[in-house]
Amino acid sequence: MSEQSKLDDLVNAIQTFDPDKVMEATNNALKAGIDPLKIIEDGLTKGLRIVGKKFEDGELFLMHLVAAAEASKKALNELLEPRIAQSKGQRKSLGRVVIATVAGDIHDIGKNIVASMLFAAGFEVHDIGKDVPVDQFVSKTKEFNANIVASSALLSTTMPMQREIVKSLDAVGLRNNVKVLVGGAPVTQDWANEIGADGFAENAIEAVNVIKKLVGAS
């Protein structure tokens, strides 16, 4: 099989939403000697973009987006990133994102989808998890030299943490160097304006578009 057919197999595997098929297709591409960065760009990323577009057009449902994102993340974390680390390869990035669900909130499906879609769009994404305290948002922003900080709050009771993230970034002198995006079911544009965030998004597709505009990559 040609290199292109191996990559096409991966793109098609992502659209089956089957993690085993995605892992197998990724492994086959690596065994064929295809550059891991090319597998990311022309395999995982291409497949995720197709799924994202179909979701945006109403052809797929949220469960499909979740499944594709999780399958791709597994292949990236377990197969591709270790190989890239060995070869010291580096993917061209539109920006460095720190993303997490705020302290007190353990809901992470929406955040996971946003992280995967940002990755697919060409961002370097550092997903630091769920129930993440404010000081960890700040420390990871420093550690990764991030220029975008995205936080998700799925509960109205945890929304104030987003305000504290903005305040803390300002207190340590990082606020002018980063763009802050907020999201989550109870979050609105008015809330983003009130706490001094740079952007707000209702869903993963919008989050990618907003962040691209914020960093001048749209």
Image (spheres, rainbow, N blue to C red):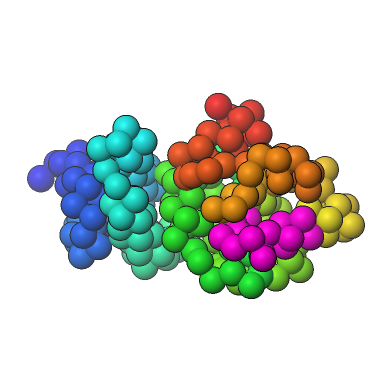
The answer to which of 32 and 111 lies nearer the viewer is: 111
| Residue 192 position in % (x across, y down) | 71, 44
Q: Is residue 177 magenta?
A: no
Residue in view at x 78 percent, y 44 percent? 194
**Which stretch did the figure color magenta?**
151-164
Quadrant hosting residue 43: top left
Residue pictured at 36% horizontal, 67% vertical:
78
Question: Would you say 3 lies left or right of 81 here?
Answer: left
Give the residue drawn at x 84%, y 56%. Answer: 167
Q: Nearer the viewer, residue 73 or 78?
A: 73
In this rendering, the answer to whether 74 lies above or below 94 is: below
Which quadrant of the rendered structure holds the N terminus?
Answer: top left
Q: Nearer the viewer, residue 147 or 196?
A: 196
Vertical comparison of 24 with 59: above or below: below
Q: Residue at x 66, y 39 (%)?
A: 189
Q: Nearer the viewer, residue 12 or 165?
A: 165
| Residue 119 in picture, x, y percent from top left | 47, 48
Q: Is residue 154 magenta?
A: yes
Left of 154 or right of it: where is 3?
left
Above/below status of 94 relative to 172: above
